[in-house]
Image: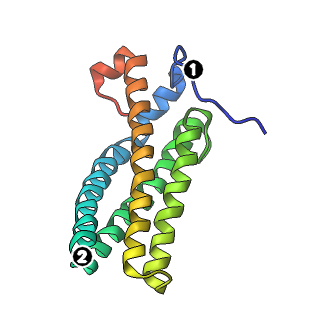
Amino acid sequence: MQVPKGPSPAQALYTAEERRRRDQSKWTLVQGILAPLQFVAFLVSLGLVLRCLATGEGFALASASIVVKTLFLYAIMVTGSLWEHDVYGQYLFAPAFYWEDVVSMGVIALHTAYLVALFTGWMEPRAQLFLALAAYAIYVVNAAQFLWKLRQARLSSPNDLASGALS
C-alpha cells in the first residue's frame, strides 16, 4: 500500500471541481463553526485540567470539560468525514488530507481512552488528567495540521482570499 503524500507545495489543494464541491457542501460551514467552538472548549478545559493538577481541586469540573471537548471532537470528526466525502468522494484518508486524518485517529483514540478511564475507573483521577493532557497535545498537533492546510488552500487560490471560503 502506497501512502499518499498529499499535494506538493506547487500543487493546489483542490482541483476546480473539488473546490466547487467544497463551496457547495453544507459541511464546510458546519466545520467552520465547530472548529473554533472545539478550540474554545479545549482552552477552557486545558485551564481546568491544569488547575486541578496544580491544586487537587475541581476534578469533577475538569472531567466534565474534557467530556464536552470530546463530544465536540466526535462531532467535528463525523461532520469532517461527511465533508471529505462531499469534496473528495471518500469519508476518510483522501490523499489531500491523509496525514491529518491519520493524526486525527490518534486524537480520537486518546480522547476515547480518557472516556473509558473516566467511566470505568480504569485509572486513578490524576492519571486520567494526564491522559487528557496527552490527548490535548496530539489535538494541538492536529489543529496545526489543519490550519496549515487552510493556509495552503487560501494561498493556492486568489478567489478563496476574496470570498473567505473555508478549506
Question: Residue at horizontal 40%, vertical 39%?
Answer: 144
Image quarter (top left, top right, bottom left or bottom right) of the N terminus = top right
**Which residue in the rendered view is the most extreme toward the bottom?**
121
- Which residue matches tag 2? 61
On residue 8, the disc is 1
Q: Name the foreground residue: 48 vs 15.
A: 48
Question: Residue at horizontal 45%, vertical 34%?
Answer: 22
* Mark 2 secondary-structure assignment: helix
Question: Could you tell me the amino acid type at mark 1?
Answer: Ser
Q: Name the foreground residue: 114 vs 17.
A: 114
Question: Residue 25: x and y, percent?
Answer: 44, 40
14 over 64 or under it: above or below:
above
Q: Residues within 10 Å of mark 1 (few under 14, many from 20)?
A: few
Q: Name the foreground residue: 74 vs 108.
A: 108
97 over 114 or under it: above or below:
above
Contact between labelled residues 2 and 1, with CB atoms less than 8 Å apart: no
Image quarter (top left, top right, bottom left or bottom right) of the C terminus = top left
Q: CA distance from mark 1 to mark 2?
A: 44 Å
